[in-house]
């Protein structure tokens, strides 16, 4: 797991307004004007939030005519769900098991010398 990339995604979700934007986009593809109806801030503030979400690859943008339409990156949402599930449960891919296995492998290599 790339902890830095995962932390970047989580950082983008650290603001309640960005989480709300994702929640709204989980229902449908929306343009900025539709999103703004749900908030009490300006269009430049929305653009800032959208940029952070897009930079984290949490949303995708499609230009239709002169309008930008935003939607949730479904592929990434599945990946993030899997990572969270992995982090909160013990499995063979867990870092503690991986680290132990790597140390055992290294010990076996050294002991055979």
Image (cartoon, rainbow, N blue to C red):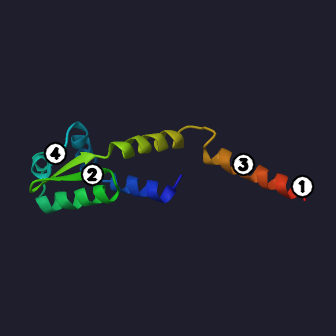
- Number of residues whose C-alpha sits closer than 10 Å to that of mark 2, classed few (under 14), some (14–19) or many (20 or more): some
Q: Is residue 85 left or right of residue 48?
A: right
Q: Residue at x 42, y 45 (%)?
A: 80
110, above or below 88, in the image: below
Q: Is residue 33 left or right of residue 50?
A: left
Q: Are marks 2 and 4 in contact (CB under 8 Å)?
A: no
Dot 2 or dot 4: first in sequence order is 4
Dot 3 or dot 1: first in sequence order is 3
The residue wearing badge 4 is: 30
Dot 1 or dot 4: first in sequence order is 4
The mark closer to the camera, 3 or 1, is: 1
Q: Residue at x 49, y 38 (%)?
A: 85
- Number of residues whose C-alpha sits closer than 10 Å to that of mark 3, classed few (under 14), some (14–19) or many (20 or more): few
Please tell me in which quadrant of the rendered image residue 22 appears.
Answer: top left
- Numbered circle sitting on residue 112: 1
> Between marks 3 and 1, how big is the CA–CA gap?
18 Å
**Secondary element type, mark 1:** loop
Dot 2 or dot 1: first in sequence order is 2
> Between marks 3 and 2, how big is the CA–CA gap?
39 Å
The residue wearing badge 2 is: 60
**Secondary element type, mark 2:** strand
Expressed as whole percent of the image width and height from the top left, the position of residue 15 reads: 29, 53
Q: Residue at x 53, y 41 (%)?
A: 86
């Amino acid at each position: 797991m790339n902890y830095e990339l995962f932390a970047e995604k989580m950082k983008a979700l650290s603001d309640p307004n960005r989480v709300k934007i994702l929640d709204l986009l989980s229902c449908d593809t929306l343009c900025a004007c539709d999103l703004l109806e749900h908030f009490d801030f300006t269009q430049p503030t929305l653009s800032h939030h959208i940029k952070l979400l897009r930079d984290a690859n949490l949303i995708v943008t499609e230009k239709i005519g002169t309008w930008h339409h935003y939607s949730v990156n479904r592929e990434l949402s599945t990946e993030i769900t899997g990572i969270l599930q992995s982090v909160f449960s013990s499995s063979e891919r867990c870092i503690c098991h991986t680290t132990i296995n790597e140390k055992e492998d290294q010990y076996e290599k050294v002991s055979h010398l």
